[in-house]
Every structure is written in C-alpha cells, then in structure tokens.
Image (cartoon, rainbow, N blue to C red):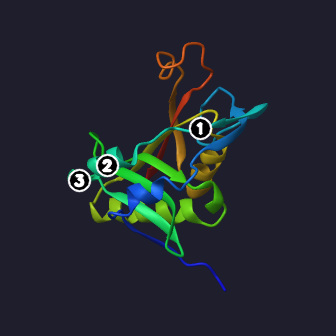
Amino acid sequence: MSATLTVGPADDRFAADFAGCDFSFEVTSEALPPFTGPGLGAVTPVDVYTKAYGSDPRELLDASAEPDAPLFVARIDGRLAGYMALSKAWNGFAEVDDIAVDKDARRAGVAKALMDQAVSWAKEQDLPGIRLETQSNNVAACRFYERYGFELSGYDRHLYSALKPGTREIALYWSLRFV
C-alpha cells in the first residue's frame, strides 16, 4: 500500500505534531568558495555533526497569521512530515523563511511537494519568483534547490559571525525566477 502525501495550510494540529518530529540533519560536507553560481560548485568533507535550527512552532503559526505569509505543512498518511513558511519579500519575490522535513520522511518527495506549493502560491500572488537563504554546511538542501531549478545568486560570509564567532558557515542565497 502506497503512502499518501498531502500539502496544505497549517492547522491547529501543527504545534502538537511538531513536537513529534526531528528536523535536525547531519552535516557531512561544506560548500567551498568561490560562490559564483549558478550551481553550488565544490564541496569538502567535514567531521560529521548534527545541526538543528530550533524553530518554534508557535512563532511559525503567529507569523502565518500575517497577510502574505502562509505556513504550509506536508503530511504522509496524516502524520506531519515537513513544513514551509513563506512571506512576500520587500522586493516582491516570495521568500522561503523556513523549510524543514522530518528525518523519518526524507527522500519521500516532501521537500519537492512543499516547493511545488510555494511556486503555486507565488504564481497565484503574481510574484516574479522565489528566493531563499541557506548555509554552506547544508549541502543536501543546496543540492535540492539546484535540482529544483534555483540559481545560486549570492553569498554573505559574515552573516553568522555575530551569532557564532569563528564560524565557517556562509549564507548562500538562491533564486528561482519565473520571468
């Protein structure tokens, strides 16, 4: 029997279901400069470690109450498998503010289904495309964005330095333009 993957707006189950998920990921490599795009370029292996962003489901729900800021959830057979928070950026693009897939649901098409929903939403809003930011140590996500059709459009090597002095993390900006 095949599992059923659905995507739709977050509902009142989101915060409780969120607690049962593991959105952390293993870092096994890091992207290397120069970040000239349109793709990621070279990567290097690193000592494996686990990273989690620590998103708060209540903050995500509160933000989604704002106009032009939907929160979409993916469910597999009713179980929370991932989510994506979007907003309309200052430059008119849709912006992915947060996207995460539960560890047990990876490789099941969840990220693609969420991104497809984001593209549909952005096009319904008549926006020119989608932009997002991730880090040089989230190579799996970068490779997904690249396969989906995003272009590496910039970077900021100092963005995280105030949060974690001495960090090697580099912010990578990705764009998917519709026009």
Q: Label 3 neighbourhood size at 10 Å, few (<14), some (14-19), many (20+)? A: few
Quadrant where the C terminus is found in the figure:
bottom left
Q: Which residue is mark 3?
A: 65
Q: Which residue has dot 1 on it?
A: 37
Q: Nearer the viewer, residue 105 or 90?
A: 105
How many numbered circles are shown? 3
Between marks 3 and 2 in the image, the one whose residue lies nearer the viewer: 3
Residue that appears at 57% across and 57% down = 148
Residue lying furthest bottom in this view? 1
Q: Which residue is mark 2?
A: 87
The x and y percentages for residue 150 are: 53, 50
Residue 82 visible, this orientation = yes
Of callouts 3 and 2, the N-terminal one = 3
Instruction: Measure how far apart labels 3 and 2 are at the Cα level.
Output: 11 Å
Residue drawn at point x = 59 percent, y = 38 percent: 37
Query: Where is residue 31, by image quadrant?
Result: top right
User: Residue 162 shows which numbered tag?
Assistant: none
Indicate the position of residue 114 as horizontal and vertical percent values: 48, 62
Q: Are marks 2 and 1 in contact (CB under 8 Å)?
A: no
- Amino acid beneath label 3: Ala
The secondary element bearing badge 3 is classed as loop
Q: Residue at x 53, y 18 (%)?
A: 164
For mark 2, give the secondary structure: strand
